[in-house]
């Protein structure tokens, strides 16, 4: 029997799908993550944007073309948001974002759906590649940003036990482990927080990279634990969303512009070479030209190494959906301006490291340094961890020379 696990969306979905694939292999299935003829399909959906939802629904038709008679199990956020959209597409079984620990039960399930529970779902320990692996430590979100649908789909924040995290980490043979979750900043296991997770992982041979963080995690205690761990990449993906206090308040982001910049300054105090990357939403309802100017300015002030910018997309069911949307032309023009400013910031950050030697982990088509600089090097092999000297800038990174393998 052959099974296909097809995934859309975030690193949390990717981590969950890797676990599902391991569970399928343990049951004797030949498993693939590419759409191809199979007996069973598990579709792990996404609903972070309307486009992601659309692609999730379209995937059903793509699966049917591969095998019209196959059993199709749909799980994840897009189903959680709009169950009827998938039930109407003649799938076999459906379940939401909080029941992925029971997806494998659905292989022999005679019903059509499962109810949700507000607990952290444990999944099989996945097989790990020799390069990079995602380890899911948390799920759900209590922040309820006004533009975001995810808390309504993933439920309240739930953390994985530190014991369970270490069990999965012990099975990992990857060179880099990425800690993922919907809001890993909120991680708690008794009196243990995210910094304690880093300390617990400090004796493993792989390096650790943090997933997306919120400004509130950046305090001295956390940074001291991170530095003491010694194997954590100096890369902070610190979500911003806007450089305007007025817009941040409308977004229900729980910090000010000044507080965000203070967090960046504290990071640089501890890790002068750190890469701070971020997300920015362009054209949020009520965003004025002055608000947008504040966003452009903070790109330079924060010293971002990379900016992931995207235009605001209204999500029905959120608070922001009730606000008047900005014209598409305004969003497009502002996106273009922000892209130029962000590209210049990325070039400045990269220039600081040309001629320097950094550690990099290589994948099939290149690698990343500990501070998230994309590098390509002649003779690099997938799965290698090397010291490299950055020679010259290239599109989306730098060309490097391998000094030695670690």
Image: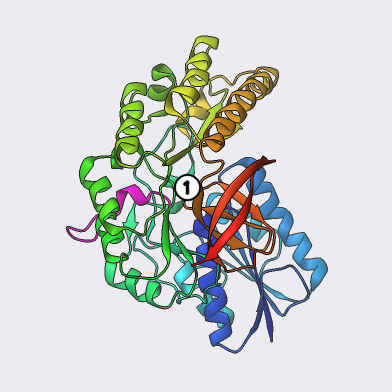
Q: In the depicted view, which residue is nearer to us: 267 or 4?
A: 267
Element type at mark 1 = loop
Q: Residue at x 39, y 19 (%)?
A: 245
Q: Position of residue 113 (x, y in %)?
A: 53, 67
Does residue 110 appear anywhere in the picture? no
Q: Is residue 218 above or below residue 76?
A: above
Q: Which residue is mark 1?
A: 371
**Residue 52 inside the magenta-drawn segment:** no
Q: Position of residue 41 (x, y in %)?
A: 67, 72
What are the residue bounds of the magenta stretch? 181-193
Q: Residue furthest right?
A: 65
For label 1, count other residues whose C-alpha is less than 10 Å away and answer few (under 14), some (14-19) or many (20+): many
Does residue 195 appear anywhere in the picture? yes
Q: Is residue 360 above or below residue 186?
A: below
The type of colouring in the image is rainbow
Q: How many marks?
A: 1
Q: Residue furthest bottom?
A: 28
Q: In the depicted view, which residue is nearer to us: 370 or 258?
A: 370
Residue 314, picture quadrant: top right
Look at the magenta stretch and give its main secondary structure.
loop
Q: In the depicted view, which residue is nearer to us: 80 or 10?
A: 10
Please give left or right for residue 101 compared with residue 5 in the image.
Answer: left
Q: Residue furthest left?
A: 191
Please give left or right for residue 338 compared with residue 332 in the image.
Answer: left
Q: Residue furthest top?
A: 290
Q: Position of residue 177 (x, y in %)?
A: 45, 63
Residue 143, picture quadrant: top left
Q: Residue at x 39, y 67 (%)?
A: 121
Which quadrant would the N terminus be assigned to in this image? Answer: bottom right
């Amino acid at each position: 029997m052959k099974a296909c696990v097809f995934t859309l969306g975030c690193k949390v979905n990717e981590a969950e799908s890797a676990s599902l694939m391991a569970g399928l292999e343990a049951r004797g299935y030949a498993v693939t993550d590419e759409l191809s003829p199979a007996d069973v399909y598990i579709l792990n959906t996404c609903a972070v944007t309307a486009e992601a939802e659309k692609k999730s629904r379209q995937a059903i038709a793509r699966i049917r073309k591969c095998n019209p008679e196959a059993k199709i199990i749909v799980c994840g956020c897009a189903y959680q948001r709009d169950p009827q959209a998938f039930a109407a597409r003649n799938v076999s079984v459906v379940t939401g974002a909080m029941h992925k620990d029971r997806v494998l039960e659905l292989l022999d399930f005679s019903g059509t759906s499962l109810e949700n529970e507000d607990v952290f779902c444990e999944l099989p320990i996945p097989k790990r590649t020799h390069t990079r692996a995602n380890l899911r430590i948390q799920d759900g979100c209590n922040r309820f940003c006004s533009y975001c649908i995810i808390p309504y789909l993933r439920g309240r924040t739930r953390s994985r036990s530190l014991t369970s995290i270490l069990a999965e980490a012990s099975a990992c043979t990857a060179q880099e482990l990425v800690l993922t979750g919907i809001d890993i900043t909120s991680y708690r296991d008794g009196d243990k927080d995210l910094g304690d997770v880093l300390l617990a992982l400090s004796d493993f041979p792989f390096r650790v990279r943090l997933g997306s963080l919120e400004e509130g995690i950046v305090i001295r205690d956390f940074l001291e634990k991170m530095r003491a761990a010694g194997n954590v990449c100096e890369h902070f993906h610190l979500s911003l969303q806007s450089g305007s206090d007025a817009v941040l308040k409308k977004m229900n982001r729980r910090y000010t512009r000044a507080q965000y910049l203070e967090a960046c300054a504290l990071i640089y105090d501890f890790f002068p070479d750190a890469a701070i990357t971020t997300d920015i939403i362009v054209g949020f309802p009520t965003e004025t030209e002055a608000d947008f100017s504040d966003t452009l300015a903070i790109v330079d002030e924060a010293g971002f190494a990379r900016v992931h910018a995207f235009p605001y997309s209204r999500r029905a069911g959120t608070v922001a959906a009730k606000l008047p949307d900005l014209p598409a032309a305004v969003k497009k023009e502002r996106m273009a301006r922000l892209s130029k400013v962000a590209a210049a910031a990325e070039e400045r950050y990269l220039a600081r490291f040309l001629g320097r030697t950094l550690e990099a982990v290589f994948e099939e088509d290149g690698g990343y340094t500990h501070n998230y600089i994309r590098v390509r090097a002649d003779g690099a092999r997938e799965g290698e961890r090397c010291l490299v000297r950055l020679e010259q800038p290239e599109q989306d990174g730098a060309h490097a020379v391998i000094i030695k393998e670690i």
